[in-house]
Image (spheres, rainbow, N blue to C red):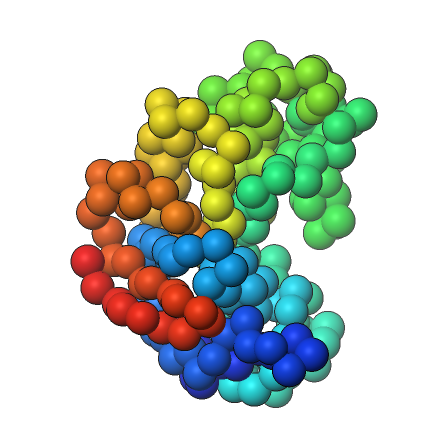
Amino acid sequence: MIQLFHITKSFEGAFALADISLKIDKGEFLFITGPSGAGKSTLLNIIFGSEQPTEGQIILDGRNYFKIPRSEVAILRRRIGFVFQDFKLLPARTVFDNVALSLKVMGVGPREVRNRVLRMLSFVKLQHRANFKAMSLSGGEQQRVAIARALVKEPAIILADEPTGNLDPALSIETLELFKEVNSRGTTVVVASHDKNLIERFGRRVVRLENGRLASDGR
């Protein structure tokens, strides 16, 4: 599903990532961990295609990111949902509008947009908040909106960058349970987290980065 070959990323001579090679299988649930500044966010952004590595190659679903036309990269990225640590919601827009946005960009028709958004809001238990402004929600609710927005595209891959960083322990577990449910349906899930207790609780494969390098890979 995802293969990284000798990925290196440098900024003004400083290495954010150095020689990362990694394979993530279809349907896998993987944690990427490490201290602040280890390169977790940079690695997810490179997989998503929002950043390009200084060196290296990425094979995503059998296709090389850097050897296909840019128009096809955009189509490939539609197969990836991204959950950001700071949510990146449109605060003055409703919950429904925030979740619907990516579908509208993809050209999905109004009836299908409505059906898929309401189904996804039901999945994250926020259907009763559909017409509320995003700014009026609690942090935990905003995170669930962000998850719904990523999932509504029905992506093959979910990337989540510190999705529990702003949540209390109970909400953190609830959030990871949502990802676990999505993964059980066949979606590949990659979560960047520094929460050791949470990672141990879910018992999945863990890739650890230190100073931009792959320090360990196991369970």
The location of residue 168, given as percent across then percent down, is: 42, 25
In this rendering, is residue 71 above or below 139? below
- At x 45%, y 36%, the residue is 164
Residue that protrudes farthest toward the right in the picture: 92
* Viewer-nearest residue: 127 or 42: 42
Quarter of the C terminus within the rendering: bottom left
- At x 58%, y 12%, the residue is 128
The location of residue 10, given as percent across then percent down, is: 61, 78
- At x 60%, y 77%, the residue is 14
In this rendering, is residue 47 above or below 125? below
- At x 80%, y 25%, the residue is 92
The location of residue 146, given as percent across then percent down, is: 58, 36
* Viewer-nearest residue: 92 or 117: 92
The location of residue 18, given as percent across then percent down, is: 47, 80
Residue that protrudes farthest toward the top in the picture: 128
Is 80 on the left-hand or right-hand side of 193? right
Is 105 on the left-hand or right-hand side of 193? right
Quarter of the N terminus within the rendering: bottom left
Residue 48 seen in render = no
Residue 218: name its quadrant.
bottom left
In this rendering, is residue 74 above or below 136? below
* Viewer-nearest residue: 85 or 26: 85
Is 192 on the left-hand or right-hand side of 95? left
Residue 5 seen in render = yes
Q: How many marks?
A: 0
